[in-house]
Amino acid sequence: MLETFFQGMHLLLRWDIYFFIAAGLSIGMFVGAMPGLTTILALSVLLPVSFKLEPLLGIPFLVGLFKGGIYGGSIPAILVGIPGTAASIATTFEGPALTRKGHGRKALEMALFSSVSGDLISDIFTILLIGPIAIITLMIGPPEIFAIIFFSLVLIASISGDSGLKGAIAALIGLGLGFIGTDAATGSTRMTFGFMSLSAGIPLIPLVIGIFALPEILLAVESRAPRFVSQFIGYSNTGEKLRWKEFKSSIKTILRSTGIGTGIGMVPGVGQVVAAFVGYSAAKRASTHPETFGEGELDGIAAPEAANNAVNGPTMVPLLTLGIPGDTATAILLGAFVAHGMRPGPLIFQEQGPLLYAILMSMVIANILFVFLGYVLLKPFAIAIQIKKSYLIPVILALAFVGTLSTGDNSDLVIMLVVGFFAYILRKLDFDLAPLIIAFVLAEPVEYTLSQTMLYAKGSVLQYIFITRPISSAFLISALIWILYRAIRSFTQKRT
């Protein structure tokens, strides 16, 4: 494993890798700073760019895009109290108060340094942890993997959005879309409705762009607001720089939030928003002066920003070892890995270990680059959030169409438009679309592991899973208990 790691380090001795990481960080930070846009939108629209590059360039580009976007959301959250991303909602508790006091620049720099610190520590932890976990996953078979995937889908669907039932419906739609195409076991086509273009299944690019880009564009146009942020932001009046003494006093808070974010990141479906709120609450409870929280505390910036960024690295653990994405971003990354011929799972470290470690180390490099890049870009991006929507929305729409057509098949454009129309309707009906895309990318491993399990069981599936395979039975029983718990909880809440 150590030899594989150093082979991966050797692959990073190329200047173009750093260029694409920096490009991803810059674009992500810009998109994250626009309250009307999302990091998922950027990942969706720019996913085709990754496909045109080799894996060692394309995947780090997407990783940089994601990291930059999570931090970028803190810029409007601090300056005007409008979170650029959902992950920076908790940052609005202290950010605007600090800006009103004339400490906006300190808050922005605290957000940057705590974000990078939390992300960097969790990435290092991920690299140290992922190898041993991959070795353990080699000891389990298809029944266990199917049970873990099923449990993850149940967990993600039930805690996504405000309604567990809507999450379950979205997940079922995603599985249905994933099953369209040719049955790998029998070779027969299914649910293609006579369209030959669907015989190979629904392509990832038009589906992702249709689900995430088109609804976001339509909702942005529908709002009719001329700008993303209406307030004027005078960056020159945001006060003095953050001092080392002030950052040092928040190190304990950053480490605590990093631990919280790292733990939450390894649980599928929880994500940055929960980590940010838990980190903020923990910082307030641990403070010697909790009554000042809400009035402009730098610890109140450090805590949620370290926590939500610390989630990024650990989400790669279930993704790479089991092929299970924990959120929408990692579902898109899973699609990128598969498109580049790197199927995440127990065998990926044996088959493509050096390349995989190079990609993981690029996450650490992205954080180091971000310290300098984020500091330089703070001022222009703080001003850029006042840009008019009429300038950006047409560019994003054009990128969505070009990205879809880049696959070389005109039918993909039809798929993108149809999927986008129905995704827009689901968004208007308050459906969370994260379970849909996660279930879609998991449809193939679900089918494969289930068919393998049935083959091993030789007709006695229940006896095989629940008696001879204790790990799989434990996850399946846990999933059923969780479904029952959520159903009872929902029923009692309606009664009261």
Image (tube, rainbow, N blue to C red):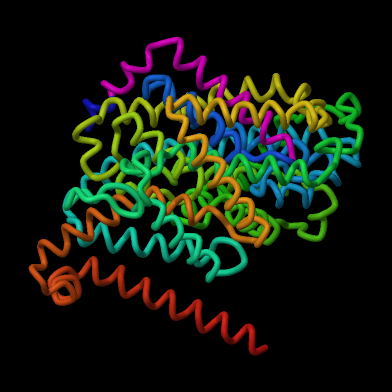
Question: Seen in the image, is 202 located left or right of residue 274?
Answer: left
Question: Seen in the image, is 467 located left or right of residue 105?
Answer: left
Q: Nearer the viewer, residue 225 or 476?
A: 225
Q: Locate residue 426, reporting x and y percent.
A: 61, 57
The quadrant in which the N terminus is found is: top left
Q: Locate residue 295, reporting x and y percent.
A: 85, 52
Q: Is residue 404 above or below residue 315?
A: above
Q: What residue range appears in magenta?
A: 6-35
Residue with the most extreme left position: 458
Query: Which corner quadrant of the image does residue 401 belong to?
Result: top right
Q: Locate residue 187, reporting x and y percent.
A: 19, 48
Residue with the most extreme front position: 194
The quadrant in which the C terminus is found is: bottom right
Q: Nearer the viewer, residue 183 or 102?
A: 183
Q: Locate residue 218, reporting x and y percent.
A: 70, 43
Q: Residue at x 64, y 36 (%)?
A: 71
Q: Residue at x 29, y 56 (%)?
A: 446
Residue 313 within the magenta-colored segment of the rendering? no
Residue 442 seen in this snapshot? no
